[in-house]
Amino acid sequence: MTSLFEREARVIMRTYARAPVTFVAGEGSWLVDSDGNRYLDFLTGLAVTSVGHANPSVAAAVAAQMERLVHVSNLYYTEPMVELAEALVQRSGLDRVFFCNDGATANEAAIKLARRHGQKTGGPDRYRIVSLDDSFHGRTLATLAATGQPAKQATFQPLPPGFVQVPPGDIGAMEEVVDDTVAAVMVETTQGEGGVRPLEPDYLVALRRLCDERGALLVVDDVQAGMGRTGTWFSWQQLGFSPDIATTAKALANGLPIGACMAREEVASAFEPGDHATTFGGGPVVCAAALAVIDEIESRDLLANCKERSEQLMAGLADLPGVKDVRGRGLLVAAQLDGEIAGDVARRALLEGRLVVNPVRPDAIRFAPPLSVSAAEVDEALERFASTLA
Ligand SMILES: Cc1ncc(COP(=O)(O)O)c(C=O)c1O
């Protein structure tokens, strides 16, 4: 019989080098493969399944909504969308939400909103977007143009114009480029795909001040770091500033596709009916799932758990022989290894240790367990990772 791997190789476009494992089920912090082996999931699909696999409350909310109403056009009202927007507004401190389908479309919305606002307030030349080297904002053409990774951009030139990158952490470099042609500066507070690199609060506060002085908007891409991943609902809430626009996606509906672009009232009002649209964004089923996720995080006090398990995980990793350094915020953590061995380490952790982690850099491993992870599961993961390193 032809294996699933062979069938995949015939019919799926070759954009991924997949690990030789087929997952068939999950529960909480655990995944099960097609041979019945159990894996401790410390990646959660890249910071997505934050309230655990097969979460019963999310599953019940989705099933109930599926039976009631799956889709109508965004030309009509639906309750879960409005309720979810109210929940996000209340928790983010921002005023309005545009729902879409994932991180890239949330950032596309942010870029379009920033341009619309820039051109309305500063004239036709205020449209440029400044982002950071080593950033990651998505794979659509505009979000790729904002992504400060030349290797990912090289094969898709020409990219849309109006995007420029500067080194992270260097406020002088920002001062040089942020002029009256810049609509917005866009940053991740912890660069996720760039290697889990937290930006200093002082730098972010100085960036906020610079944007205010120069009339540019500040956009936080909280696609990976939002929805409690760093121990507060949104990453900036522990860093002493707030953005004009913020995006979030990955963990918002615990694995169902959804993205959100949120903004302050004065900025959001730059969009008029017809300026932007989506078929699926804000659909009743994903919004019902996201409402259940928010309820799980609050009723189980998972922000507090995130902080406690973060300390445990980071301290435990720092003690392991072979780990040179540990960085991150909340449960978005990287262990710096000695040499470019992370690919091999992650593969062995998966196939031998049955621990799912990812080589976020050639020399660094990313850990992003569910916010619901237990102390015993963190100990178990540390043990498995230690044996892999050994
Ligand atoms: C910070 C950040 N922004 C945007 C994206 C793109 O999100 P998506 O893959 O859902 O389009 C990602 C994905 O890794 C991300 O980490």
Image (tube, helix red, strand yellow):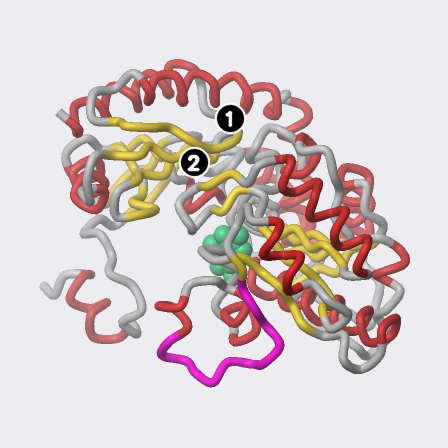
Quadrant hosting residue 386: top left
* Closer to us: 256 or 146: 146
Instruction: Name the secondary structure under disc 2.
Output: loop
* Closer to us: 136 or 36: 136
Residue at position x 85%, y 73% from top?
122
Q: How crowded is mark 2: few (under 14 residues within 10 Å), some or many (20 or more)?
A: many
| Relative image position of residue 42 (x, y in whole percent) | 37, 34
Of labels 2 and 1, the one closer to you: 2
Question: Is 316 left or right of 279, judged from the image as shown?
Answer: left
Q: Which residue lies furthest to the bottom in this view?
A: 158
| Relative image position of residue 199 (x, y in whole percent) | 55, 40
Residue at position x 57%, y 33% from top?
230
Query: Cβ(mark 2) to ligand 1 < 8 Å?
Result: no
| Relative image position of residue 267 (x, y in whole percent) | 84, 60
- Give the answer, above or below, for where 254 lies relative to 316: below
- Give the answer, above or below, for where 203 lies relative to 378: below
Question: Is 15 left or right of 118, judged from the image as shown?
Answer: left
Name the quarter where the N terminus is drawn.
bottom left
- Give the answer, above or below, for where 217 lies relative to 372: below
Query: Cβ(mark 1) to ligand 1 < 8 Å?
Result: no
Magenta residues?
A: 154-165
* Residue 67 is at least partly visible in this image: no
Name the quarter where the C terminus is drawn.
top left
Identify the disc placed on residue 372. 1
Instruction: Name the secondary structure under disc 1.
Output: loop
- Give the answer, above or below, for where 132 lies relative to 113: above
Q: Is there CB contact under 8 Å for labels 2 and 1?
A: no
Identify the disc placed on residue 368. 2
Residue type, label 1: Ser
Residue type, label 2: Ala
Q: How crowded is mark 1: few (under 14 residues within 10 Å), some or many (20 or more)?
A: many
